[in-house]
Image (cartoon, rainbow, N blue to C red):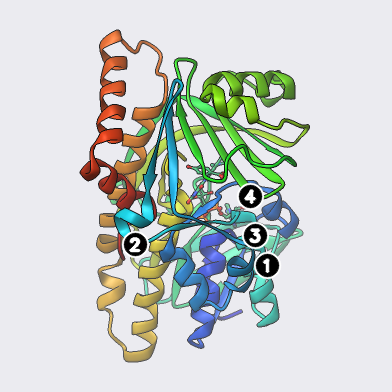
Amino acid sequence: MKTQVAIIGGGPSGLLLSQLLHTRGIESIVLERKTKDYVLSRIRAGVLEQGLVRLLEEAGCAERLHAEGYVHDGTLVSYGDEMFRVDFTEHTGTPVIVYGQTEVTRDLYAAREAAGGIIEYEVEDVVINNADSDAPYITYTVGGEPRRVDCDFVAGCDGFHGISRQTIPLDVRREYEKVYPFGWLGILSETPPVNHELIYANSTRGFALCSMRNENLSRYYIQCSLSDKPEDWTDEAFWQELKRRIPADQAAKLVTGPSIEKSIAPLRSFVTEPMRYGNLFLCGDAAHIVPPTGAKGLNTAASDVHYLYNGLRAFYETGSREGIDSYSEKALKRVWKAERFSWWFSSLMHRYPHQSEFDLKMQIADLEFLRSNKAAQQAMAENYVGLPY
Ligand code: RFL
Ligand code: PHB
């Protein structure tokens, strides 16, 4: 097979890039390791920046998002029984949209299918060949059968555990990493959200987050130990622990019920540089990971897609290589700012092993400063709704 852009990974980055290229008549093929049902069963992001919403509009995939997504003008931050609100719209003129990554992915699959886009599922043994030449090609197998795709460019959208990043030789690639000494235990339950906006809670027992998908579907997280397993936590134990970490007036109105999903995610900050090697471009989690505090993962993947899509589009429409040549530098500039915000917000909100009394006082002072200082709230709001691109 021959195509213009071979895309490895059918998560949100790969699908969005493929659909955007399609709107400009640029051909692509998406190679996905799992089945579509498996990809759609992963419960992940819930908060979308305007930048991602605009890209989904440009891709023709925003109708359901506008009909069913929830506009959030602010968020709540609590510590103990104290709580305050950071107003995004007041400080930046921009809200965020609560709409699940699962739904974004579902809409993108539907658009790709309606346009007759090629997505190969359950691909194995994917190898990117001659990435540093003008004639790269991908080899892989499906059901044991060998296949090959020749292309102009390769987009590595295969997430943190994919093969694209590993294709960049070690003497070219530099990796930066911080692993946090805790995880997030998340549950999904068919109960009304405790509050109409998200609550990020710092408590002496550890972090908690109250989020949602819709009026009758709540998403809650609590900081947990890295050695915990989801099955160690009964629903009852989860609800009890959550109630102890959020302000008492919120705990009193929390509606509990059976969980329909329960999983643990470790927290990590990670960046690989450069994000380009010859005609291979890394996008999204393949190149960087943030801890989920601040909801930057999917949104940062989207800004990569924006830079890469515009670079490829300029190349095919005008022959200019400027956009693809500056891709890595432009994407990384924004990535590092998202890394900084996610690291800062994680550091502010979690309990760390060996945290001293002094460290705890610093967290509270930082929270009280944020509570009372308009400039600090504005800085947080600008980062939360997404820095411009
Ligand atoms: P994905 O979603 O990991 O998709 C990569 C795809 O590539 C496939 N793949 C391969 N395909 C072919 N060959 C191979 N060798 C392959 N290896 C892998 C995989 O099967 C998969 O389908 O990466 P992508 O597209 O870059 O998207 C990134 C986002 O998924 C991620 O950043 C977010 O989910 C992070 N995240 C959040 N981001 C936000 O912006 N807002 C949030 O509120 C938010 N909350 C979260 C999150 C992530 C979480 N977890 C579980 C890590 C909450 C959680 C709990
Ligand atoms: C979610 O709803 O899954 C979610 C929301 C905000 C975050 C992380 C996750 O910061």
Residue at figure coordinates x 36%, y 66% from the top left: 132
Q: Which residue is mark 1?
A: 120
Q: Are marks 1 and 3 in contact (CB under 8 Å)?
A: no
Queried on whether the Cβ of the residue with tag 1 lies below 8 angstroms from ligand 1, the answer reads no
Q: Which residue is mark 4?
A: 213
Foreground label between 4 and 2: 2
As shown in the figure, which amino acid type bears the numbered disc 4?
Arg
Q: CA distance from mark 1 to mark 3?
A: 20 Å
Foreground label between 1 and 3: 3
In the rendering, which numbered label is found on residue 103?
3
Foreground label between 3 and 2: 2
Q: CA distance from mark 3 to mark 4?
A: 10 Å
Q: CA distance from mark 1 to mark 2?
A: 41 Å
Q: Which residue is mark 2?
A: 93
Nearest to the observer: residue 140 or residue 249: 249
Nearest to the observer: residue 90 or residue 380: 90
As shown in the figure, which amino acid type bears the numbered disc 2?
Gly
Q: Earlier in the sequence, mark 4 or mark 1?
A: 1
As shown in the figure, which amino acid type bears the numbered disc 1?
Glu
State which quadrant residue 315 falls in.
Answer: bottom left
In the rendering, which numbered label is found on residue 26?
none
Queried on whether the Cβ of the residue with tag 4 lies below 8 angstroms from ligand 2, the answer reads yes
Residue 110 position in % (x across, y down): 69, 72
As shown in the figure, which amino acid type bears the numbered disc 3?
Glu
Count of numbered circles in the view: 4
